Structure formats: C-alpha cells, structure tokens
Image (cartoon, rainbow, N blue to C red):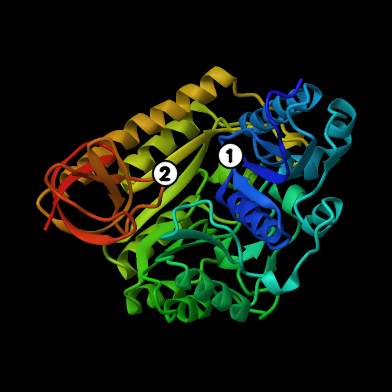
Amino acid sequence: MKTKTLKKNKVNVVTLGCSKNIVDSEVLMGQLKANNFLVEHESKTDDSSIIIINTCGFIDNAKQESIDTIIRYAEAKKAGQIDKLYVTGCLSERYRPELEKEIPTVDGYFGTRELPRLLKTLKADYKHELIGERLLTTPHHYSYFKISEGCDRPCSFCAIPLMRGGHISKTIEELVKEAKHLAKKGTKELMLIAQDLTYYGLDIYKKRNLSELLKHLSDVEGIEWIRLHYAFPSGFPMDVLDVMNERKNICNYLDMPLQHITDNMLKSMRRGTTKQKTIDLVNEIRNKVPGIAIRTTLIAGYPGETAKDHNEMLEWVEQTRFDRLGIFAYSHEENTHAYLLKDNVSAKTKQARAEAVMALQNGISLDLNQQKIGNTFKVLFDKKEGDYFIGRTEFDSPEVDNEVLVKASTDFVRVGDFANVKITSAEDYDLYGEVV
C-alpha cells in the first residue's frame, strides 16, 4: 500500500561500485534531466516513482551488495511504494539471464553500454548533443573524468572485460570539451579514471597518448588539479612523468595497482611483469618525480599464494613504503582465467594476510605523516563535518586517502576553495593543521 504520493516523472538513481559507475550514473542523470524528468541521486525523500540501480559485479562483496539492493527495491515495488524498477551496470551485464529468472519483479535489465536502450524504455531520447555533459553527484569542485571504457588487459583474476568489453578511448577533442564544460560549472580538480589510463590512445591514435591528453587538459582554464588513477605497470609510458614535471596543475600523484610482487604470483596473474621490473619501475618513477605519492592496490590469497609469497609481499611493502595502499582478499570469479585454478587459500587466511599488510601500512603511513609536521601544503577543502573543515593535499584523492582537518572554531575556509595549511600534528591517516 502506498504511503505517499509518488511523483510520476521522478527518477531516483542508486549507484554501487567504483568511480567509473559514478560517471555512468551522472551521464544517465544528465540525459534524463534533458528529457524533463525530475532526477535525484540516492534520494532521501522516497517519492520517486522510478528507481534505476547502477550495479557493481566486480567481486563477491560488491555483487552481494548489488543483489541485496535490487531485492530491497523489488520488495518496495511489490508493496506499491514505487512504480518501476530498472537495473543497469556491471552485475546486470554479467548475469542478466540469471537475474531475470531470480528477480522477475524488475521491469528491465540493461548492460554497461545500453544507455540509449534504457532511455528508450523510459520514453526518453538519447541526446547526442549532450555528450560530455552530466549531472555531478560529487561536490562541484571535483569530478571523476573517464577517458576510456573497457579493457584489453589479460589479468587472470579480473572480470571487468566481461562486463565492460574491450578498450575504447575517447578522443582528445571530446575530452577537452568535457573538461571545459566542467570547469565552467566550477570543477577545479579532474580525477582521470579508466580501467587502464596507460592504454589511452592505442586504439584511435595507434600509440600510448596519455601524455598528449594531459597537455591539452592542463591547458583548460579553471582546472587547478589533474590526478591520475589506475595506471597499469607493464608498458607504463614514462613521458607522462615529464608532463607531470612540466605542468604545475598535474598532481604529483599516481594510482598504480600492482596486485602482488612475487614472480610466480605475477606470472599466474598474467600481469606481464616481474618482481625486479616492478621494483625498478617504482624507483624510476620516484627518481623522475621526486616527492610523488604512489598509491597501490594488492590482492591477498590469490590461488597458490603460499606463506612465503605473503611474507615476500610484506617485506616488499615495508621496503617500498608506499604513500597509499589498499588490499583486497582474492575473489574467485567465474569465466576468468584464474577460475581454472583451485581457490585453495581459505577465507580466514586471506583476511588475516590482508590485515597483516594493512597493519604494516598503517605504521608506514603514520611515519610518513609525522614527517609532514611543520610543513605547509596547498589544500582543497571538500566539506565541513562537526568541528572541522576537511580537505586534501595534492597527494590525496577523495574517499580513499588522507584528509587534512582544520578547526572551524579558529580558521574559516570555504568548501571548494584552496588554502595553504601548516601541519601541526598527524595520525596514521589524518593530518591536522592551521590555515597560513
């Protein structure tokens, strides 16, 4: 039984998963708004007649969250609390037949590249003139900026090519137009994302062209920070570092998921590199860009990972002292190459190994942060929470990295603005400071 009147043309878009999904939802919302729909992202008012869930299908936990969310809204539809329910994104791309059978209450399932079909179902037109425009779900001063879609890498553990398809780069012209549009709306920071930034341009320019793209984006008036996420280590284009040194608005920051370090794990993971090549690459990056912050992601408990492999990883993490680090417990994904291997590390052991790596990283992060005390950094402020204004340095991305906290009782800053902050104290993942 309906508890309140639903707004017939109001759509609530619910996003699960990664920043690439956030961009897809923002594009969808831009199209819906242009078709005169009322549209909100994760609305708190419960008066939308239409729900669209943008799902994640990456690993077990993400898949379960997506399924739980679909079931919750399917129950709401049965109770008459919403009129229509649509599901899109990675889980829908990967498991559509199973989902249609198990949760038939959903009015339609759509894949990752079926935006026009989804819009048509809603009796909306796909407006080509809106390419590059979207409704931001992030604060307006920063934006995730997707430069390509899909992936051609053969990593054994990864199901993303199954869900996102092969690599397709956007043109430099299209991306510059999008950046200018965002800058006009107040965006100061672009966070470049893709399944693999370093592959950019190979399909359309027949060469790795990330450095050329960066030059054009850094020329866009109003863009003060450009941040690089998800760079593959094998075949990394070193000319990107030259541009980073040349251009002040390209952050000294690189997110490079390395996954593991032992030769047998890297070979089984089909990463196209070795332990020594990985060590040499990290050293070369740090030599070329002194002070660069490197974020990496690792996997614990990949099939065949021994205690020796794990200990070697710990030793390497301790020696390398990454500025930022995250780790996942391995998820055994059907139709991937690694699915042919026996998933022989127990869930308990995977978790224990992941926790051991993070405990080590906590100490490294604390030590590195303590060294920042007394130094002054340019900080972009994202929000005010409780007694603090909260921001980030150029070495930090939103949600995943360190934050800088400034007391609101003693300093005033505007959210979305930059300020110079002198660091007065530090914890493992938080810096405290005063506006200079």
Answer whether residue 95 is visible to the viewer in this image.
Answer: yes
Q: Quadrant of residue 91?
A: top right
- Which secondary structure lies at badge 1? loop
Q: Which mark is residue 79?
A: none
Q: Quadrant of residue 338?
A: top right
Q: Quadrant of the C terminus?
A: bottom left
Residue situated in front as seen by the camera: 126 or 264: 126
Q: Residue at x 39, y 77 (%)?
A: 242
Percent x, y of residue 54: 68, 43
Instruction: Tell whether label 2 touches label 1 (CB within 8 Å).
Output: no
Q: Residue at x 53, y 77 (%)?
A: 213
Residue denoted by label 2: 400
Task: Find the distance from the CA under tag 1 to the CA under tag 2.
Answer: 24 Å
- Which secondary structure lies at badge 2? loop
Query: Relative to 159, is 105 above or below?
Result: above
Q: Residues within 10 Å of mark 2 (few under 14, many from 20)?
A: few
Q: Nearer the viewer, mark 1 or mark 2?
A: 1
Percent x, y of residue 112: 75, 52
Query: Relative to 384, is 131 above or below?
Result: below
Would you say 202 lies left or right of 275 here?
right
Q: Residue at x 69, y 63 (%)?
A: 34
Residue situated in front as seen by the camera: 436 or 297: 436
Would you say 371 lies left or right of 341 here?
left
Answer whether residue 261 is visible to the viewer in this image.
Answer: no
Residue situated in front as seen by the camera: 43 or 315: 43
Q: Residue at x 86, y 51 (%)?
A: 121
Instruction: Name which residue type carries label 2.
Output: Val
Q: Quadrant of residue 250?
A: bottom left
Q: Which mark is residue 43?
A: 1
Percent x, y of residue 18: 57, 46
Instruction: Name which residue type carries label 1.
Output: Ser
